[in-house]
Structures are given as structure tokens and as C-alpha cells.
Image (cartoon, rainbow, N blue to C red):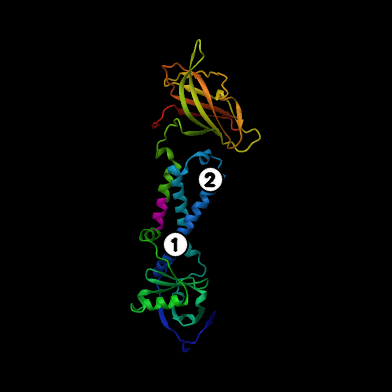
Amino acid sequence: MEQNFDSSEPIEYKYKFNCKYEKSELIDAYMDRKAPIRYKRAFLGTIIFLAIIIIFSKSNYFEKAALYKNYVFWCLSGVLFMMIFLRNHHKFMWKSLAGRSFAPQANTYDIYLCEDCINLIFPLSGIKKVFNYDEIDVYEVKDYFILENEYLNGFNIAKEKIDKNTIDNVRNFLKNKTRVKNLGLPFPLRKFARMPIYVEIIIIMILLIPVAVPMLTTTTSKVVMGESVVCNNLGIKVKKTSHVSFGKSNPIDLYKVELELESFEKETAAGKSYSETEFKLVSKDGKEYQRFSISDPKEIKSGALKEKESISGDLYFKVPKVEEPEYLIYTAYNKSKSKQYSQKIYLSNKGEKK
């Protein structure tokens, strides 16, 4: 409700406050009021963006990796959080408010807390607004009481403008009329939310470095037994290896590799094809060992796996007992991309740094 008023018209009120603020004072209170909103938007927005990336990404990284163990995932989360946090900085949000002005006519007003309503008067423009208590939200943060609804847009009653003995009485009066919400944040969060905009931009740039250039910020471990690797949409894990003998009269020395294979191919009619010939054993000096078939029912043969389907089986290679192969290598050719993919799994129990 808005109307012109006669300055001689009496108003029955419980408390009256003459409010006049500079631009810096208004922004200060505005930052306090919007800080919880910034955190909420940044947190929820980060979760939504990460979910979209993971769901729609075609990368096997998101299919297989334990994301919470990977530093890139946390850097990406931090970048998304800071970008949304920055977007809701007061320099952007304040400018987006329609009708926000720093003119004396808008920043000088009298607030009358009456028994049944609030009278808001702009003496310089001669405009009066009347609001019922159930139409407004009252916030308390630091040194302000803030009155807000879709029209008020956050008018302040600074506590330094209230007599110290009256502050508790005003608080209790407002609580009896409407709900007073406390916007206080823990000290570290409050300070973080008040960072200059250039500091937030610097933080984003720092977080982008390990995301954009991971090879410059970390080293990768060799894949070893018990660990999974995805190559050309085939998940491979070496579960166990051992020297074995085949035959009784003239036994042959073999090296048994127990494998687990899993398909990460998107649903296709043919499924993810694989072949035992795509695997090789290699020694430390580069010597390749020939595969040997013993017609064991558990021996891996050529086949295809549907999406998320997995199998376990064995492969045998001719390896003398006195020799130890260094790694198993899987090499496959992707016809659709005209590209060859290869991955090594080291036959040791402990990874080494490349």
C-alpha cells in the first residue's frame, strides 16, 4: 500500500527510527543478508553440475574411477562452487535488483513500528507505505534488523541507531509480531563470503591449474595386480598370477594369469567384443611370451560382453620358471575411431611412480 502522506498526520507507534544510510552501509548489510543464499546456491549448483557431468559424460573415467579419491574431482568441484559463488557476488546481485538507487530519496526513511502494522515513510519524496507484520520477513544479523518483502527489498534498522537499552525490547516486540530469522554465519564463512571479487577470481584460476594441466601438478601410478584399468571400453583386472606346469610325461612351464573383464561399452547390439589374442606378457627387457592354450573350461576365449556385464577367466603363457614377466599388456583397435588403444598392468603388488 503506497500513498502520499501529510506530515502533520499523527501516527500511533511503539518505536520510531530515523534511518539514513550511505551506499557503503547499505551494501554492507546487503552482503550479510545474501551470504547464506550465496552458500546455498553454490552448494546446490555444484552438486547439480557434477551430476550432469557424470551422467552425460561418455568418459570411462566417470564410469570406473573412485571420484572421491581423485584430486581432479575435488578441484573441479571447487571450481564449480567458486564460479557459482562468484556469480552471486554482491557486485552482480546488487546491480540486478530493479529500482535499486542510492538517491537520498530512497535511502532516507522513517520506520514506525506500530501495534498492527509498519509505517515506512520517505520524507523527502512524501511517500508512505504501510505493511502488516505477516507480510514481511525480519532478519537479524550483526548490527542490523532487516525488514524485507517483495516491495521493501531489505530496509535496515541499524542497532547503532537504537538505544542500547531498547535493542532487546525491539527484538522481543518484533518476535511477538512475526518470526525474526538469524542470518549469523560462523566467523570463517562470514569472512569468506566478504572476500573482494578479485580474490574469488584468483581462487578460481588457482583451482583451474590442476584441472586443466593435471600432468604438471601430479604423478600417476602404474596399474598393478588387484587394480582395474579401462582400455577401449573394456575393464581389466589381474586378480592373481602363478607359475604352473602342464602335462605329465614332459611338462611345460606356463605362467597363469587370472583375469576379470568388464564391459563399459554403451548398449549396442553386438556388445563389447574381446579376444585372448589381444593380451601379451612382456618381460622387463621387452621379451614377449607366447600365449598357450590348454583347453581349460575356465580359459578366456574370444567373445562379447553386454554393458556392465563381466566375466572371470584364465590366460596361459609359455614362461620358464626362472623368469618373471614384468607386465601384461592389452592392445585393441577401435574401428569406429580408427585408433589403437593399449594399457599395461604390472604384475607386482605395489605401484611405482612413473
Name the element at disc 1. helix
Residue pointed to by mark 2: 54
Residue pointed to by mark 1: 36
Task: Give x and y (percent) for residue 58.
Answer: 56, 41
Mark 2 or mark 1, which is nearer the start of the sequence? Answer: 1
- Kindly report the secondary structure that dominates the magenta region of the rendered protein: helix
Residue type at numbered disc 1: Pro
Asked if one can make out residue 237 in the rendered structure from this viewpoint, the answer is yes
Who's the residue at 50% across and 73% down the image? Answer: 136
Neighbourhood count class around disc 2 (C-alpha, 10 Å): few under 14, some 14–19, many 20 upward: few
Residue type at numbered disc 2: Ile
Give the vertical position of 289 relative to 218 (above or below).
above
Task: Determine which of the numbered discs, if any, sits on residue 216 in the image.
Answer: none
Who's the residue at 51% across and 28% down the image? Answer: 259
Asked if one can make out residue 19 in the rendered structure from this viewpoint, the answer is no
Name the element at disc 2. helix
Give the vertical position of 174 relative to 282 (above or below).
below
Magenta segment boundaries in residue numbering: 195-203
Who's the residue at 46% across and 87% down the image? Answer: 12
Q: Quadrant of the N terminus?
A: bottom right
Task: Give x and y (percent) for residue 305.
Answer: 60, 32
